[in-house]
Image (tube, grey):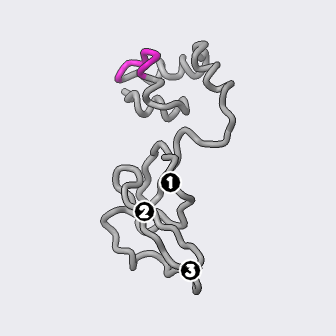
Amino acid sequence: MITRREAAQRLDIPIEMAARHGLPSTLTEAELREIEDNPPPWLVQSRANRTGKKPVWVDLVCEVCGLTEKARPKKWWPTFTYVSCDSHEPSALPEPLPGEVRVEIPGVGSQFTGWVDAPLD
């Protein structure tokens, strides 16, 4: 069975939209394939309205161990230099380049920390 979250990721729509339009909490592979092959009008309209400026889902990949998670990007997220699991020490990442400082951004996804290397002012 496929969860609503997994279905939303595969359809490239927010979970809230999937729930609002009646996608059940679990679907079979055949049910999801039917939606993909014959999208309902609301899904066709959603895809037509996309500007491509902001992705619906992003893949977070730990720079240290390779653990991955799909997450909805937040407006406040900067462009990360690195992403790592919360359990890894900052020293596990490559050092910032000379003349740069590293800023920690906790709370990225459910278990990640984002890192931004920026030039010193």
Q: Amino acid at mark 2?
A: Ile
Give the residues in magenta: 19-25
Q: Amino acid at mark 1?
A: Trp
Badge 2 marks a residue whose secondary structure is strand
Q: Main secondary structure of the magenta part?
A: loop
Asked whether disc 1 touches disc 2, contact meaning CB atoms under 8 Å apart, the reply is: yes
Instruction: Report if residue 22 lies within the magenta region.
Output: yes
Q: Quadrant of the C terminus?
A: bottom right
Spot occupied by residue 49 in the image (x, y as percentages of width and height): 66, 26
Mark 1 vs 2, N-terminal side: 1
Which residue is identified by label 3? 100
User: Residue at point 45% right, 45% down?
Assistant: 71
Looking at the picture, does residue 90 appear above or below residue 87? below
Image quadrant where residue 15 sits? top left
Q: Callout 2: few (<14), some (14-19), or many (20+) C-alpha neighbours within 10 Å?
A: some
Q: CA distance from mark 1 to mark 3?
A: 19 Å
Asked whether disc 1 touches disc 3, contact meaning CB atoms under 8 Å apart, the reply is: no
Which residue is identified by label 2? 105
Residue furthest to the bottom: 98
User: Residue at point 41% right, 57% down?
Assistant: 67
